[in-house]
Image (cartoon, grey):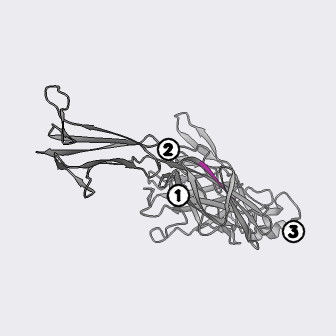
Amino acid sequence: MKNKHSLLHTALTLALIGASTHSSYALNINNNTLSFDAGITTTSTYGTVLVPTGSYFAMDTNGDGRFSTNERIAISTGPLGGITLGALQPATGSHGGCPDGTESPGPDAPWCFFGNTGMHQVTGNPVINNGDGTLNFSGWGVVWNGIANIPMGGDPANFPADTGIANISCDNTPCLPDDVQNLDYFAHVPAGDPSNFGGVAYSLHLANVVYIPTEPVALISLVVTDGNTQECNSTGGNTISVQSSITVPTDDAIEIVNWSVDGVVVASGENLMQYISLGNHRIDAEVITVNGVIGNASTEVSISDTTSPEVTAAFIDKRHDTVITSIQHRGKLKIQAEAQDICDASPVVTSMIGAPVEDNDIIRVSKENDYIKLNVPSLTLSVSASDSSGNSASAQTTLDILE
């Protein structure tokens, strides 16, 4: 059983020893990165996937009060190198199905859980070293299967043991420079969470954690208002809104945020309001701080047109310019055959007028005092339209011809 230790005692011990491969551990300052070993997954002789060593999280999905090896999901550090102390590390791009490379991870690399992609993230409150062998994990969370955040900082209202505190342990008290240090954290998924895992116990184990001094980083994440896939709502495309969330190093500030669409710089500012055309587009944001630190983020936006044109088929009284459904033989009328489309300014319209005939006779007409008289009881106007995206619609109306 590993004993709890005090980071303060460790810092003093390492300071007395002098320079060593673990000397950075004594710093424990914000913006240092907490790295950890990757989880190692194996398969038992019975075909069960196990995570016996390394880093993992586990869910007590069967409610037996234990976190067995087949309930563990192996995790590894993401592109940011691990948990950055004192900084928010949001993750975006979770989705149905297992990871496919489209994700924007935070502290760890994307993983697959119950057939859906998830990532850990730090939102609200950054992970802070408390200086007593513990870390504040109240801002720890999970983005999974399209859910923006499943807060994993604990649910003390329903589970008093949830403290939001992670503990670090090692082999000796105080820790020796070459000791293996592990982080362990326990919490519950909040009751009523939309993931349907509300109340399930959660465990996090990070193996061989090492504090690494890092260069200052600027973190930026993007959220597209109304979603990354949108319906065309104006001629040829949409005006989209993208909100950024930015964290810069302590004692630094945002100088400028530049936005690009498909590689072309289009705007600056912390948020983007931009018209984009039908199709798939890449949105990139670059934040530059006063001290020259640069952070980047990107997302994909798709504008589609699945809405059919609105078609009008009508007979119009020429004298009063009103829609009619019947007319005297000597009445004067005009035809309205048109269409309007939200995305296509000029949909293709076709129309046809027909009349009922008997015994395969053609429509009979006669001329009387310069008027054409149709010897049919009614006329039917059929109008159809299609837009540039291939959506189509039709309308039909009938005009009775009175004696």
Looking at this rendering, what residue extends furthest in the bottom direction?
251
Position in image of residue 397 (x %, y %): 24, 45
**Which label is found at residue 202?**
1
Position in image of residue 4 (x %, y %): 67, 65
Q: Are marks 1 and 3 in contact (CB under 8 Å)?
A: no
User: Against 362, is 229 above or below?
Assistant: below
Instruction: Residue at 46%, 58% (x, y): give it.
Output: 200
Q: Is residue 312 left or right of residue 109?
A: left
What amino acid is found at the position of numbered circle 2 in the picture?
Gly
What amino acid is found at the position of numbered circle 3 in the picture?
Leu
Looking at this rendering, what residue extends furthest in the right direction?
18
Of labels 1 and 3, earlier in sequence is 3
**Which label is found at residue 16?**
3
Q: Magenta stretch mostly in which secondary structure?
A: strand
- Neighbours of disc 3 within 10 Å: few (<14), some (14-19), many (20+): few
Q: Residue tagged by mark 2? A: 115
Q: Nearer the viewer, residue 96 or 173?
A: 96
Of labels 1 and 2, earlier in sequence is 2
Range of magenta residues: 281-285
Instruction: Residue at 58%, 37% (x, y): give it.
Output: 43
- Neighbours of disc 1 within 10 Å: few (<14), some (14-19), many (20+): some
Evaluate whether residue 65 shows in this view. Answer: yes
